[in-house]
Amino acid sequence: MIKINFSFPVIRHDQMGIAKAFGIGEGNEKATFRWNHVLNDRLLSNTSLIFSTTIIKLFTPPSTTGDLNITSDIRDYNIKT
């Protein structure tokens, strides 16, 4: 028996625009691919491929002068068996 699960990427952003007024931006995504395989009545195998990313931005709000733009992009890849 083979079972495959996939969760679609989840993207979360500031919907109200509050972070934009203060010069902060944030978002993340994740995706998981999982494979379960039953080898026999007493032995099974679980394998997962996991991807996630987090983005954080600091910038100068539109109401101020100056030019600040800092971005942190963290990506994580995992394989678990």
Image (spheres, grey):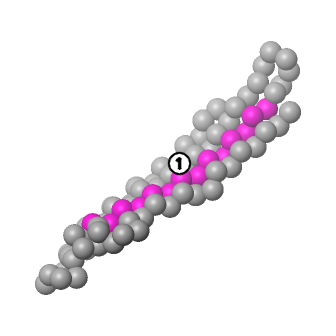
> What is the three-letter code of the residue carrying label 1?
Tyr
Q: In this view, does 24 lie above or below 2?
A: below
Pointer 1 local density, CA inside 10 Å: few below 14, some 14–19, many at least 20: few
> Which image quadrant: the N terminus?
top right
Q: Nearer the viewer, residue 68 or 65?
A: 65
The answer to whether residue 40 is visible is: yes
Q: In this view, does 74 lie to the left or right of 66?
A: right
Please tell me whether the stretch drawn in magenta is mainly helix, strand or loop: strand
In this view, the residue farthest toward the top is 42
> Which image quadrant: the C terminus?
top right
In this view, the residue farthest toward the front is 16
Q: Is residue 6 left or right of residue 44?
A: left
**Residue 71 picture location, percent across and down:** 31, 66
Q: Check residue 28 for magenta coloring.
A: yes
In percent of the image, x 38 and y 66: which residue is there? 14
- How many numbered markers are drawn? 1
Q: Give the range drawn in magenta.
A: 24-37
Q: In this view, does 25 lie above or below 78?
A: below
In percent of the image, x 50 and y 61: which residue is there? 11
**Residue 39 picture location, percent across and down:** 83, 25
Q: Nearer the viewer, residue 32 or 80?
A: 32
Q: In this view, does 12 lie above or below 79?
A: below
**Residue 41 picture location, percent across and down:** 85, 17
Q: Which residue is disc 1 drawn over?
A: 77
Q: Check residue 34 for magenta coloring.
A: yes
**Residue 40 picture location, percent across and down:** 85, 21
The answer to whether residue 71 is visible is: no
Q: In this view, does 56 lie to the left or right of 28?
A: left
Q: Is residue 30 above or below residue 13?
A: above
